[in-house]
Image (spheres, helix red, strand yellow):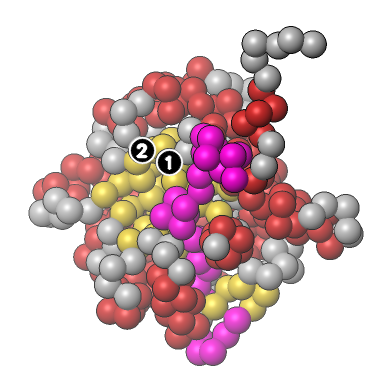
Amino acid sequence: MELLRRNRILRASPAIRSLVAETILTPADFIAPLFIDEGENIAFEIPSMPGYYRRSIDGTIKEVKELWSMGIKSILLFVKAADDTKDNTGKESWNPDGLMQRSIKAIKDAVPGMIIMTDVALDPYSSYGHDGIVEDGEIVNDRTVEALVKMSLSHAVAGADIIAPSDMMDGRIGAIRQALEQNNFTKTGIMAYSAKYASCFYGPFRDALDSAPGFGDKKTYQMDYANRIEAIKETLMDIEEGADIVMVKPAMAYLDIIREVKNAVDVPVSAYHVSGEYAMIKAAAKMGWLNEEKAILESLTAIKRAGADLIATYFAKDAVRLLL
Ligand code: PBG
């Protein structure tokens, strides 16, 4: 054969492949989610997330120091609220001495350079396990947004760098941005969970925080996974309302959405490789059916290739070790 083009030339060795690789993961691509609990010296392995822990603040600080030393620059905080603090108003979520607020302060003191992102939604604090306030069996929008604004301001006061609303209520980004401005938090960013789908892949996360909905599902606020155009609408509205970073969630089953959003916006795009995606790889690896290390790198590279500038993933530390 006489071929003018032989594509295999650029695949012949690891060296040439690395010269022409289009997508390269780095530690600064990752956001490490952290689950925090009350107490001291607590490290609870989440049953459906083997190898991932919910820790008390002391252990969380050690973990954050380690993440920072590995070159990971951001963390996303979730707390497990005590059962006796849960109600239908979510008021524990803006308690200045709440677990989240204490965690933010302690981490800021210990590792000032780390970018602290905080989840904003009522589910860990809700007696119904819903992201909003419930009235007559419905998750009401506007009252919920008022609560989310208080929650966001309390995170900003505690020292959060970036507020990350994951609740999917209408108008919350604009309301939070306005409240930040009015209270002079002009350096606090917003990462909006803009295209967040109602997904079964959040199951293990709800185990981690004991936050599964007590009735019904989240389909009246999170998006229908049948929809693509709606993701662009949601994302553009969040940017108009003041989002600095937008997010698509989950990641692996939504690579098309990540790419469409990336092409449509001029702000950084993040993707959340969620708990169920972590659990699937862990489970298959445990059975000996998948090579865990290869599955991690292939998944995260694919998410970045699809268009994610940032990736929230429970594999952040594993990935950095594998990249070395
Ligand atoms: C809370 C929240 C959820 C996740 C992030 N923030 C759960 C949900 O919406 O039910 C899921 C994260 C994961 O599964 O890893 N609103």
Comparing 46 with 21, the one in front is 21
Query: Is residue 109 toward the left or the right of residue 317 in the image?
Result: left
Look at the numbered discs 1 and 2 and tell me whether their residues touch, using CB distance below 8 Å.
yes
| Marked residue nearer the N-terminal end (1 or 2) | 2
Camera sees residue 177: yes
The residue at which mark 1 appears reads as: 309
Q: Is mark 1 within 8 Å of ligand 1?
A: no
Query: Is residue 241 toward the left or the right of residue 45 in the image?
Result: left
Camera sees residue 86: no
Give the farthest residue toward the front. Answer: 2
Q: At label 2, which amino acid type do we have?
A: Pro
Residue shown at the point (64%, 15%) measured from the top left: 5
- Rendering coords of residue 264 (x, y %): 39, 21
Comparing 165 with 139, the one in front is 165
Within 10 Å of the Cα at label 1, are there few (<14), some (14-19), or many (20+) other Cα atoms? many
Mark 1: secondary structure? loop
Q: Which residues are magenta?
A: 15-43
The residue at which mark 2 appears reads as: 268
Residue shown at the point (64%, 69%) measured from the top left: 52
